[in-house]
């Protein structure tokens, strides 16, 4: 009897504690937001991820009746921005829009201990889109097709250069996947920003790069770059005659940057749901579809509940790619 009473008291204490926590969570969410929200962009201005963040900032600000500011923190393939977000208070006032699979970044940290745990230190809020990339060369490049480029890399292992905006960036990993599937080896040239990575391809100092439409389409249309292939599962409507990498002779190739809003871990569930609901609603508007069409981005709204297990499942694939990138 005494043991039964002890268990009952314990259960009552646990239930009371849980109810108290729920009450605090609900109270916090009712007050949220009471000050400006900051969205960190782990990339420079003018990139697809920057444009996407700025698209969401205005309607989210109107919906929540509070300012939403954009904070660009580029460098180290996005690591600087992600680290800042991970170390922020878990109160919903700091978010980050991830442009590559978040769990990759600690694998590329030069520190002996990664600055954050990409799964444990973040709470998924919403996926809004996927961004396919384009493999581009300078307009005067001798490589007219993907087959030309692959053949050159096979003939000169480790000599054909490709650029990216940092180790672990989508541009870097895209080329790693290409090398893996085509059984080739290129020479990675890392820059701090995508604009410089692209500029050196235009100038012919680097052979090729994989970049989003925002960074390359104006240069393609201006006759500075040539697109050899696009990296997604389907062709771009703006470049209907350009094949996918898979169509161009590298079977199984498919790389796109998933745009996921994240919050620091332990952000109240009610706040995460509130933000997720608003972002999904914004991502389902005709204005968002028009924006994506202009940016050559594929809308892909996924709420927090669905996104959380999906991120875990994707980790195995990208972890392998990261390990290949590190050699």
Image: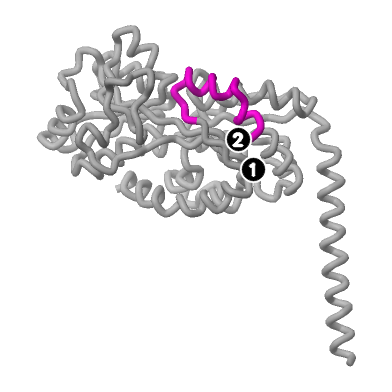
Query: In terms of secondary structure, where does tag 2 sit?
Result: strand
For the magenta stretch, what is the residue range? 280-298
- The label number, if any, that marks residue 96 in the structure image: 2
Q: Residues within 10 Å of mark 1 (few under 14, many from 20)?
A: some
Residue drawn at (58%, 24%) of the image: 288
Query: In terms of secondary structure, where does tag 1 sit?
Result: loop
Dividing the picture into quadrants, the one containing residue 52 is top right
Q: Residue 105 at what x, y percent from top left? A: 47, 43
- Residue 76 visible: no
Residue drawn at (87%, 72%) of the image: 12
Which residue in the rendered view is the most extreme toward the left? Answer: 155
Identify residue for label 1.
Answer: 87
| Residue 47 higher or lower than 123, as above or below | above
Which residue in the rendered view is the most extreme toward the top? Answer: 222
- Residue 60 visible: yes
Residue drawn at (41%, 19%) of the image: 215
Q: Residues within 10 Å of mark 2 (few under 14, many from 20)?
A: many
Which residue is nearer to you in this view: 22 or 88?
Answer: 22
Which residue in the rendered view is the most extreme toward the front? Answer: 286
What is the chief secondary structure element of the magenta stretch? helix
| Residue 204 is inside the magenta segment | no
Label 1, label 2: how many angstroms apart (C-alpha)? Answer: 12 Å
| Residue 259 higher or lower than 197, as above or below | below
- Asked whether the residues under the numbered discs 1 and 2 touch, taking CB atoms below 8 Å apart as contact, a structural biologist would say no
Q: Residue 270 at what x, y percent from top left? A: 76, 46
Which quadrant does the N terminus fall into?
bottom right
- Kindly report which numbered mark, 1 or 2, lies closer to the viewer in this rendering: 2
Residue drawn at (84%, 67%) of the image: 15
| Residue 226 higher or lower than 114, as above or below | above
Dividing the picture into quadrants, the one containing residue 207 is top left
């Amino acid at each position: 009897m005494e043991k039964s009473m002890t268990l009952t008291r314990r259960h009552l204490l646990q239930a009371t504690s849980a109810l108290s926590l729920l009450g605090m969570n609900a109270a916090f969410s009712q007050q949220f937001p009471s000050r400006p929200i900051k969205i960190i962009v782990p990339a420079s201005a003018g990139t697809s991820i920057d444009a996407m963040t700025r698209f969401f900032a205005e309607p989210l600000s109107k919906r929540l009746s509070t300012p939403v500011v954009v904070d660009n923190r580029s460098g180290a393939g996005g690591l600087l921005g992600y680290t800042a977000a991970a170390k922020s208070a878990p109160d919903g006032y700091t978010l980050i829009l991830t442009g590559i699979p978040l769990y990759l970044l600690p694998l590329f940290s030069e520190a002996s201990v990664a600055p954050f745990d990409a799964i444990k230190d973040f709470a998924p809020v919403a996926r809004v889109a996927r961004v396919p990339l384009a493999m581009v060369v300078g307009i005067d490049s001798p490589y007219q097709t993907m087959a030309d480029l692959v053949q050159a890399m096979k003939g000169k292992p480790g000599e054909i250069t490709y650029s990216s905006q940092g180790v672990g960036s989508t541009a870097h990993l895209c080329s790693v996947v290409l090398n893996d599937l085509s059984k080739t080896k290129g020479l990675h040239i890392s820059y701090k920003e995508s604009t410089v990575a692209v500029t050196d391809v235009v100038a012919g100092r680097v052979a090729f790069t994989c970049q989003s439409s925002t960074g390359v389409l104006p240069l393609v249309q201006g006759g500075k770059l040539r697109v050899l292939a696009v990296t997604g599962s389907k062709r771009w409507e703006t470049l209907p005659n350009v094949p996918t990498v898979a169509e161009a002779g590298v079977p199984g190739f498919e790389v796109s940057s998933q745009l996921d809003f994240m919050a620091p871990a332990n952000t109240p569930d009610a706040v995460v749901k509130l933000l997720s609901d608003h972002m999904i609603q914004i991502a389902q508007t005709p204005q968002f579809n028009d924006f994506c069409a202009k940016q050559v981005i594929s809308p892909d709204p996924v709420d927090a509940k669905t996104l959380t297990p999906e991120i875990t499942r994707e980790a195995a694939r990208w972890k392998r790619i990261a390990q290949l990138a590190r050699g």
